[in-house]
Amino acid sequence: MNNSTDGYLDMELLRFTTAGSVDDGKSTLIGRLLYDSKSIFQDQIEALERASKNKGNGEADLALLTDGLRAEREQGITIDVAYRYFATPKRKFIIADTPGHIQYTRNMVTGASTANLAIILIDARHGVIEQTKRHSYIASLLQIPHIVVCVNKMDLVDFKEEAFLKIKNQFKEFAPKLDVKDIDFIPISALKGDNVVERSENMDWYDGSTLLHLLENVYISGDYNHADARFPVQYVIRPQTDEFHDYRGYAGRIDGGIFKVGDEVKILPSGFTSKIKSIDTLNESLDFAFAPQSVSITIEDDIDISRGDMIVKSNNLPQQSQDITAMISWFNERPLQVRGKYALKHNTNEVRCMIQEVVFKMDINSLERNLDDKEVKMNDIARVKLRTTKPLFFDSYKKNRYTGSFILIDEVTNETVGAGMIV
């Protein structure tokens, strides 16, 4: 038994999101990261050069690498969330390039919900603007642990240190309102490549790391909750072959904590207890497993367990309630209906619920609570109280982003209408 497989597949994965207002250069920055870290195929480079030539650009327009939708390329803006994948010898990366406009707040929430790190882009000429605060607040609301503030377009302010320090101080003024682990500041020029992958010769006054170096080395193992063991059952495995005739495994992703063979566990909602008999992956049996690994767990006793149940440690239980208070980001063109009924999907569990009350709406530009206007429309963020038909087993979102989040679904249209973070 062992817990290590070597090789490419076992490289640590960092998910990060980029946010900034229109024309701050998000797509150019991602293009620069891909281009300078040699993560683009030759045919893509050739296509990029052709497209840039068609647009009349003298040099390669790196933004075209990420703006996948035709409307984005034509307008020069990002509308939908564009996911890009690349890898260096140290780490694998998934980038969510999210739109900057206020009318795409829901897209930013979607793209950022699984991120370990958020890059907030600020135009060196304009400094901290309302959108900077809004994006930083959403990153904080989504409990993204690490924020990197990239002051971009330093080439347009003559690479002056004063311009960088001024923005750094502006950001630090409202940072106490945010709930994040750490904030780093890097002066860059995405267009020219300064401090993105290579160190800048134009800013010898800056002695911090480049963006790629920070992305490769930021410590993310501690971002997962390893204290509270949570395993939502996704699927029951019954091979019924001669070799595994009696095998009954419960498959899913560990959403928190560490599980070891021999641990005493409790099954929710039944409350029955047993011990872990084995922890298996496709290729091997493990002595222990931890978040966010996907495994199959077998237990010693024959207990009826199905999708939507949760396996936890007997001495460490999640909260259990039908009454939920949550921050909700509203995705749908139809406003939220107070006393409206929705399907609620929490982990692998699905229940029905009714929204009882809107407590307040968040003004995400001023970061103040609005207690007067409680109509929650598309892209609004609000605190609500809801009641479910069956108890949920959850932790607060602050404690665990997986067991503390849910989505709301319109039962008639089957559209996802909102994403919730349990308070």
Image: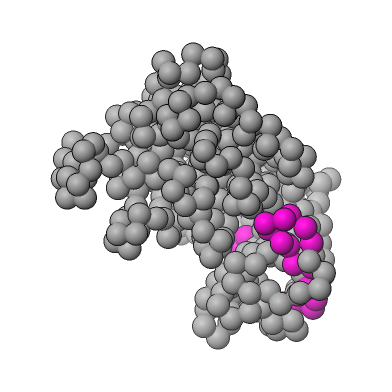
Residue at (65% x, 67% y) in the render: 380
Instruction: Please state the horizontal and vertical placement of residue 305, each as a whole percent of the image.
Output: 65, 62
Instruction: Please state the horizontal and vertical placement of residue 206, each as a whole percent of the image.
Output: 54, 17
Of residues 154 and 85, the one nearer the viewer is 154
Q: How many marks?
A: 0
Q: Quadrant of residue 26?
A: top left
Instruction: Please state the horizontal and vertical placement of residue 293, each as a whole percent of the image.
Output: 55, 42
In the rendered image, residue 367 lying in the magenta stretch gets the answer yes
Residue at (17% x, 50% y) in the render: 54
In the rendered image, residue 33 lying in the magenta stretch gets the answer no
Q: Specify the segment rendered in magenta.
A: 346-369
Q: Main secondary structure of the magenta part?
A: strand
From what the image shows, is residue 58 above or below residue 133?
above
- Which quadrant holds the C terminus? bottom right
Of residues 179 and 55, the one nearer the viewer is 55
| Residue 163 placement, left or right of 325 | left
Q: Quadrant of residue 357?
A: bottom right
Instruction: Please state the horizontal and vertical placement of residue 316, each as a whole percent of the image.
Output: 81, 46
Q: Is residue 311 visible?
A: no
Of residues 301 and 357, the one nearer the viewer is 357
| Residue 188 placement, left or right of 41 | right
Q: Quadrant of residue 149?
A: top right
Q: Is residue 207 visible?
A: yes
| Residue 335 placement, left or right of 267 | left
Residue at (57% x, 28% y) in the render: 164
